[in-house]
Image (spheres, rainbow, N blue to C red):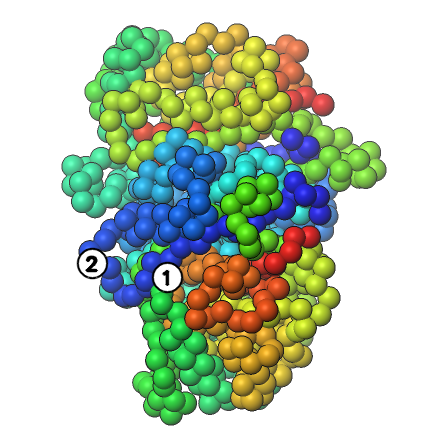
Amino acid sequence: MAHNKQVAVIGTGQTVFKSHHPDRTYVELVQDAAKQALDESGLSPHDIDAVIISMAPTVFMGVNDADRWAVEHVFGANKPVMRVHTGGASGGSAIQAAHAHIASGAYRTVLVVGGDRIAETPDAQLVLNLIWDKFYEQDFALTTVTMTALSAQRYMHRYGATEEQFARVVVRARRNAMRNPHAHLKGEITVEDVMNSPRIAYPYKRFDICPRSSGACAMVVSNLEVAKSQSTRPAFITGVSSITHSVFMGDRMGLWSENEYSDYDGMWRAAKHCYQQAGVVDPARDVQVAELYDPFSTNQFPQIESLGFCGRGRAGAISDDGGWDWNAGGVSISPSGGTLCTNPIGVTGLVRAADAATQVMRTAGEMQVDNVRHAMATAIGGSQQFYTCTLFSADHN
Amino acid sequence: MDVFVLGMAVHPPADVVGGKRLEEMVFDTTRAALADAGVKRAEIDHVTIAASDELDGRAISSMLLAMPAGAYLRDETKCTDSGLTGLCLGAMRVASGVFDIGLVVSWNKTSEAPVENVMRMRAEPFYTRPIGLNMAITDGLFAGAVCERYGITPEAADAQARRAYAQALRNPRGMGRAAPTPVAMDASPYVATPLREIHRAPFTDGAVAMVIASGDWLSKSGGRRAKARIAGLGWRSEPYDLGAERLAGLAGFRGAIDDALRTGGGLTPADLDVVELDAQTAFHHLAYEAALGGWGAAVSPGGGAFAQNPYFCTGLVNATEAVRQVSNAAYGVQVAGARRALAHGAHGYAQQGHVAVVFEGV
């Protein structure tokens, strides 16, 4: 790829994530993250050419198009500002929109920023029920929990995965999150703790499910020229891909379907395109870290397999043996604790991207994995329908 | 910018498209754009959607609408500012070198969207929502501020409304509404002084789709012809909080147009033959014209939003009109010899955001 098409991350910032930030409004949270990212990049607001705001449904906060409220707070007044929204995949789509801003040559520096306050609403699942069809689907308690549970059951049926294997994913995530100063949930728990937590929807117990998080994240992205002047170790964005699937889950499985719902084949397609751009031929060998969009414990195995880190149906057994553990020599899965521990939906994909980029920049603190050359960040939105893959690398294409 | 418009379609406008669901409108429009471009969906490698959940009445509305917009198993993204912002994002995606040919799709079924309620809920809950700000009131505040700043009079706004309706009547792609009579003008109620109902462009239902491609793809495409080149683009957002300067300064409007001209290779206003404005009221039209400062270009020859106004995607409708002008296909409202045309879009309350795209004939 030509030098003028190179795109790099030169700064990231995150607030602490928790259920409520009673002392700060949405706009104050996003400003906090934006300032951190600017400080790390060494740039001032004046140096930022354009702003992209990552924001999923604004119903959670009760302010329509809340991004517009934030414009001057994220230093976007009288600048090009746009909001990207693909549901849970918004953060992944936002970083890819930033890539387009820079790689097209339109802008030199872009601030990507977002925040969410999921717990502002008394029941997030009540809001998420509104993503479904008013006439056919909303009445039968379809939510993101029940939707994902259906996919998980199908995965279990196809590959023999067990609830205990999913519980081990939660144990690993909470342990990893102990190294993450921004994580919402963290701590040493056991498989028994997960198995004994209250049943929500088979196969889910409470601990299999992410928290409702509030907080903000930001990232400064630039072209090669600015990256060279501002950062000794930027994270280059070497692959960007998104795949959109049908909203109808039933159309994605069965004899007449060209794909398989429980396999996350959309992510497989996105990953393939991403690796092609970056020249990665053996992901299991070449990628050291993957920050996954995994609000449910069952989201990890099909993603790990779709990203090419192991064969179909193998991720669970490797997980049992510790193969995805932090710094264990294979691909470290979500060293930050991932979405299972922190889920501010509208910005979760951006948090994944920031946590992956910092691994390449070697600024991940206690989460740092050794010798990271490539780190993958994923995001998923809609009815497990919008899949984004973004690859961060130590060297540009 | 090495990005070209290959085809486009605009759903026939109506006050209420009653016989179709929104996804049917989107599907029909997308399919018509592909047919106009002579391109199969299988050739498309990405889709850029521009839509608003709030105006669609459904959280993550693209879940349902991405497929009718052609995005099944394609690289798809969505921006929520305006239809014309979607075109800017789509054009940058092509120019990035990652993609070759894609769709930009936007829609708004205003007949099913309580636009004023959506706007009122845009107000943050601490200071502005309790005083009842909505679209009508902010447009009224805008009208008052630009009257003060640019010496616009209510009589001039009356005349502009009549002129816009008359121009729209000549536009074969418009609603074909007759210009209001003097009696109707006088009888029109005030919405928010000095703004009266007759000054406002009526909302319509609509959808727009465009097929865009890189020059590289075009050169390898076996003789397919582009309608226009996307020469330059710009968009700006002003602060959220209202005040005299925010309302009447039009910094975002000027900035977006300046950016579009600059990225168009250092164009000047004199290089433009047509400007298609997204003016939601006659006061907006007059204020924008004043800000343009006597450019020689023909301004909204097809009546702009008074011809059709699917609010969220009116700017993208303007883009199709601009492409028609530079490809000598504007019929009834063609500006003779038009070579470059600028499409403008606005969004947010009291037009917090402005977008501009320059098209060049090929």
Q: Is residue B33 visible?
A: no
Q: Position of residue B119 (x, y in %)?
A: 30, 39
Q: Is residue A351 left or right of residue A101?
A: left
- To the question of a shared chain for discs 2 and 1, the answer is yes
Q: Position of residue B230 (x, y in %)?
A: 63, 29
Task: Please identify the quadrant where the C terminus of chain B is shown.
Answer: top right
Q: Position of residue B353 (x, y in %)?
A: 40, 32
User: Which is more toward the observer, B58 or B270?
Assistant: B270
**Residue at which label 1 appears:** A344
Q: Is residue B337 left or right of residue B297?
A: right
Q: Residues within 10 Å of mark 2 (few under 14, many from 20)?
A: few
User: Which is more toward the observer, A286 or A185?
Assistant: A286
**Residue at which label 2 appears:** A22
Asked if the residue at tag 1 contacts the one at tag 2, i.e. Cβ–Cβ closer than 8 Å, the answer is no
Judging from the image, mark 1 belongs to the subunit labelled: A
Q: From the viewer's perspective, is residue B183 above or below residue A8?
A: above
3D distance between C-alphas at marks 2 and 1: 16 Å
- Give the residue displayed 37% in from the left and 61% down from the top: A344
Q: Quadrant of residue A314?
A: bottom right
- Give the residue displayed 61% in from the left and 39% down from the top: A104
Q: Is residue B95 visible?
A: yes
Please name the amino acid that badge 1 sits on. Pro
* SS at circle 1: loop
> Which of disc 1 and disc 2 is earlier in sequence?
2
- Give the residue displayed 54% in from the left and 85% down from the top: A322
- Give the residue displayed 25% in from the left and 13% down from the top: B148
Q: From the viewer's perspective, is residue B293 above or below residue A86?
A: above
